[in-house]
């Protein structure tokens, strides 16, 4: 197959007549090869432990529907009109109140409302990264971030984690390794709280050290924090942005704490960066949907949103407990996993010789789905890992899904012992993000 920009070989016929017209950067835009599998996985008989979808049944839908109708009835001329790329002023003020729970002291002018935090990731990468620039990111890392970095032809260098999150010494080693090659590091991308997909949290005592390392080397920090208010014991960790407002760009979202379908997120940036983000937003979407912003603003004004977050925390804690107990009961020897204290995900390592990517079609045949580990690395690692999302199914479905998954893994272990390892095709880079791996 010819790469974009390359002429087809003599006598060859291309399935895409536009192939020669594409920009070179499209070579890194790869559709997930498991997307078709997840079309099957969405069937009701399949227990999906794959997607990070919030538990919307916990929302007060009846009262919300009345509020949404009232927004249209009383504010329709504004709600259904074009708006500012900066975002609705009242919502930006309320976002500052939300971030204050994590110790952030912010001005509404430095908040840019986005169409989900994924748009924020895209804009930050667009304004900072030239082709060939380096982005440091935990290994594993959020697949949507890796997709954005790849789309702008940035190179990802992973930084190791342990049970206490990103390892400062590993960060120093990664920086030194990149600097020896003469490449430019533009920023560190990190999910410090209840990491997606690893489920770990950056230890408080490490946070100042990570910030100091980045300041010393002139590296911006991009803090992605959609899960920070979802700690199961009620603990809210101090944001990195709270300690270093001049060198941290903060990404937030209402997708996990309210409603993902409204697609309302935000970026809090240093003032000069804020202006670039507004210009980037104007060129991408002209303006975020005003109606959606006003719905979120009305919800924050009229509902006990802190109490709703508590309800979410309790629901997700029960689901986490169901997942952990099922793993302990069913998984074969040689499997390990973490016990997250917040968020949506358990990161599982399977016995040696099992390839979670190659195993996925067989798992779906057995009516269970998960996210294989290779999608969360830019360098093809992660074949022995998988992510279980416990946020959406009921505890009963979670236990049944883990039971099915464990049986599939046991069968893979037997195949490995009989015939040797089952290995999937090598992965060359991240896939484009999708709701299946959010």
Image: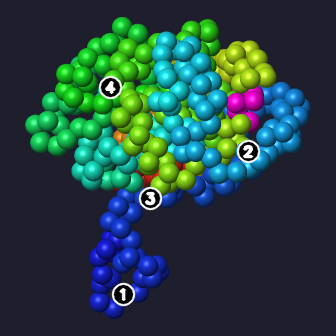
State how far apart marks 3 and 4 are (Cα): 32 Å
- Where's the C terminus, which quadrant? top right
Q: Earlier in the sequence, mark 4 or mark 2?
A: 2
Residue 331 occupies which quadrant of the picture? top right
Tag 2, which secondary structure?
helix
* Front label number (3 vs 4): 4
* Residue bearing mark 2: 79
Residue 247 numbered mark, or none: 4
Residue 12 numbered mark, or none: 1
Say left or right for 128 vs 255: left
Tag 3, which secondary structure?
loop
Residue stretch rendered in magenta on the structure: 295-299
State how far apart marks 4 and 1 are (Cα): 51 Å
Compared to 138, does 325 lie above or below?
above
Query: What residue sits 70% from the left and 30% below the top?
Result: 297
Residue 101: percent from the left, percent from the top? 56, 13
Q: Earlier in the sequence, mark 1 or mark 3?
A: 1
State how far apart marks 2 and 1 are (Cα): 52 Å
State how far apart marks 3 and 2 are (Cα): 36 Å
Closer to us: 173 or 236? 236
Question: Are the two marked residues, 3 and 2, in contact with CB atoms closer than 8 angstroms?
Answer: no
* Front label number (1 vs 3): 3
Compared to 214, does 356 lie above or below?
below
State how far apart marks 1 and 3 are (Cα): 22 Å
Tag 4, which secondary structure?
loop
Query: What residue sits 39% from the left and 71% below the top?
Result: 22
């Amino acid at each position: 197959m010819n790469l974009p920009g390359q002429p087809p070989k003599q006598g060859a016929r291309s399935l895409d007549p536009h192939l020669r017209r594409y920009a070179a950067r499209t070579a890194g835009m790869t559709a997930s090869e498991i997307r078709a599998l997840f079309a099957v996985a969405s069937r009701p008989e399949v227990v999906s432990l794959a997607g990070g979808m919030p538990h919307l049944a916990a929302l007060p839908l009846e009262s919300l529907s009345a509020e949404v109708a009232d927004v249209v009835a009383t504010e329709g001329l504004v709600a259904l009109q074009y708006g500012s790329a900066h975002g609705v002023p009242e919502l930006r003020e309320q976002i500052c109140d939300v971030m204050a729970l994590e110790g952030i002291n912010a001005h509404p002018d430095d908040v840019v409302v986005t169409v989900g935090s994924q748009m924020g990731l895209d804009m930050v990468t667009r304004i900072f990264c030239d082709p060939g620039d380096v982005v440091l990111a935990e290994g594993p890392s959020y697949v949507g971030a890796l997709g954005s970095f790849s789309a702008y032809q940035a190179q990802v260098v992973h930084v190791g984690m342990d049970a206490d999150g990103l390892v400062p010494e590993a960060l120093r080693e990664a920086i030194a390794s990149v600097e020896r090659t003469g490449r430019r590091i533009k920023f560190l991308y990190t999910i410090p709280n209840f990491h997606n997909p690893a489920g770990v949290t950056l230890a408080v005592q490490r946070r100042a050290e990570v910030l100091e390392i980045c300041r010393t080397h002139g590296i911006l920090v991009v803090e992605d924090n959609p899960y920070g208010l979802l700690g199961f014991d009620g603990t809210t960790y101090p944001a990195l942005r709270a300690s270093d407002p001049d060198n941290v760009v903060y990404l937030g979202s209402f997708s996990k704490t309210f409603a993902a379908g409204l697609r309302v997120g935000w970026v809090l940036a240093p003032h000069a960066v804020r202006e670039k983000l507004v210009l980037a937003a104007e060129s991408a979407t002209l303006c975020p949907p005003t109606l959606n912003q006003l719905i979120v603003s009305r919800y924050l004004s009229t509902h006990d949103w802190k109490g709703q977050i508590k309800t979410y925390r309790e629901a997700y804690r029960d689901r986490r407990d169901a997942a952990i107990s099922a793993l302990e009961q069913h998984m074969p020897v040689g499997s390990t996993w973490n016990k997250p204290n917040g968020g949506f995900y358990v990161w599982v390592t399977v016995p040696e010789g099992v390839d979670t990517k190659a195993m996925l079609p067989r798992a779906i045949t057995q009516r269970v789905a998960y996210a294989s580990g290779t999608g969360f690395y830019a360098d093809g690692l992660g074949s022995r890992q998988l992510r279980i999302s416990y946020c959406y199914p009921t505890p009963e479905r979670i236990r049944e899904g883990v039971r099915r998954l464990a049986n599939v893994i046991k069968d893979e272990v037997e195949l490995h012992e009989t015939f040797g390892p089952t290995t999937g095709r090598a992965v060359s880079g991240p896939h484009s993000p999708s709701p299946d791996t959010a």
